[in-house]
Image (cartoon, rainbow, N blue to C red):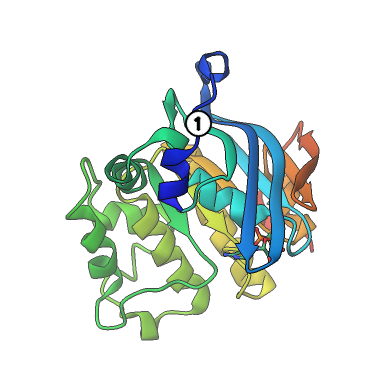
């Protein structure tokens, strides 16, 4: 994959560099997965900017390209064509080492499943990240930010699903990343527990100013976002700004 990227002829892109306030600038991004004879067009010429401090919800049916877009933003995958700028850096021209630094220093990831280490406490799971981060906050502070100040020394098996997900959020933000990318963070949780996880994400966004993008297939979550990006068949079909945001506690779905 990376070999293909390097051999591709660079297009002129000086006019597409992100202006101030834009964290991600996605320009005509296409992603094609090839499986033998079959080509899947997961993204088709997608354009999108994400701004400092905003909370964006990515909506759309299964298979519409949400995870592919999030993985490309996070430097986990590369487009087949097009450009992705993080600030003024073109990720599609980054070396493997630069991409690793980008992921390590700038991006927090939260997935549907928490992937905590069972033999480590909440605090120890979070502390693992601080050992490789440039300017981490104390693990206790990250856990307090997600409402788990009283669960520092619990092991994952002693925590509910929602609490484990909040430990995963604390682990993602303890390094103070500029962006937090969440793929179905409430997908495995019931309604009330899901709301607590969304409250933790909203709190992180408010307190740390972390640009946050959350994938969901649950349209009820859209009301807590600054902007809602809807995807359909590999394209952005709609971008909607919410004039007022609903707090997660008041969400209905
Ligand atoms: P969503 O997150 O909206 O459910 P995805 O981004 O996961 O959508 O998938 C978009 C399309 O790309 C789907 O048709 C999916 O099957 C396909 N796809 C995703 N990842 C891969 C992959 N690694 N290899 C082949 N096809 C993939």
Q: Is residue 230 left or right of residue 160?
A: right
For label 1, count other residues whose C-alpha is less than 10 Å away and answer few (under 14), some (14-19) or many (20+). few
**Which residue is depicted at the point 43% across and 22% down?**
88
Residue 203 in percent (x, y) is at: 50, 47
Mark 1 lies on residue = 9
Q: Nearer the viewer, residue 42 or 171?
A: 42
Secondary structure under tag 1 reads loop
Q: Is residue 209 visible?
A: no
Indicate the quadrant of ligand 1 in the picture.
Answer: bottom right
Q: Position of residue 222 (x, y in %)?
A: 74, 49
| Residue 61 at least partly seen | yes
- Name the image quarter holding residue 219: bottom right
Residue found at the far left of this picture: 131
Judge left or right: residue 33 versus residue 129: right
- Compared across the picture, whether 128 is left or right of 28 comes to left
Residue at left 40%, top 46%? 107
Front-most of 43 and 237? 43
Q: Residue at x 63, y 49 (%)?
A: 31
> In the rendered view, would you say 54 is above or below 147?
above
The residue nearer to you, when weighing 161 against 43, is 43
**Nearer the observer, 45 or 68:** 45
Picture residue at 51% right of the left edge, 19% below the top: 17
């Amino acid at each position: 994959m990376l070999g293909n990227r390097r051999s591709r002829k660079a297009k002129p892109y000086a006019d597409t560099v992100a202006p101030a306030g834009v964290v991600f600038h996605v320009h005509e991004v296409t992603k094609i997965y090839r499986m033998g004879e079959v080509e899947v067009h997961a993204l088709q010429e997608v354009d999108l900017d994400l701004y400092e401090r905003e909370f964006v919800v990515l909506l759309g049916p299964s298979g519409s390209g949400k995870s592919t877009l999030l993985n490309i933003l996070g430097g986990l995958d590369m487009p087949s064509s097009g450009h992705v700028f993080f600030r003024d850096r073109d990720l599609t021209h980054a070396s493997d080492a630069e991409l690793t630094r980008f992921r390590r220093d700038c991006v927090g990831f939260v997935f549907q499943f928490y992937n905590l280490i069972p033999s480590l406490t909440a605090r120890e799971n979070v502390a693992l990240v601080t050992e490789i981060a440039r300017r981490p906050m104390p693990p206790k502070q990250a856990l307090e930010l997600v409402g788990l100040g009283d669960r520092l020394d619990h092991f994952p098996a002693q925590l509910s699903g929602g609490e484990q997900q909040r430990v995963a959020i604390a682990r993602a933000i303890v390094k103070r990343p500029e962006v937090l990318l969440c793929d179905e963070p409430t997908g495995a949780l019931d309604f009330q527990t899901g709301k607590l996880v969304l409250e933790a994400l909203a709190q992180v966004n408010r307190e740390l100013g972390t640009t946050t993008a959350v994938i969901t297939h649950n349209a009820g979550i859209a009301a807590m976002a600054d902007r809602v990006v809807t995807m359909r068949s590999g394209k952005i079909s709609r971008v909607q700004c919410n004039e007022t945001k609903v707090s997660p506690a008041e969400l209905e779905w």
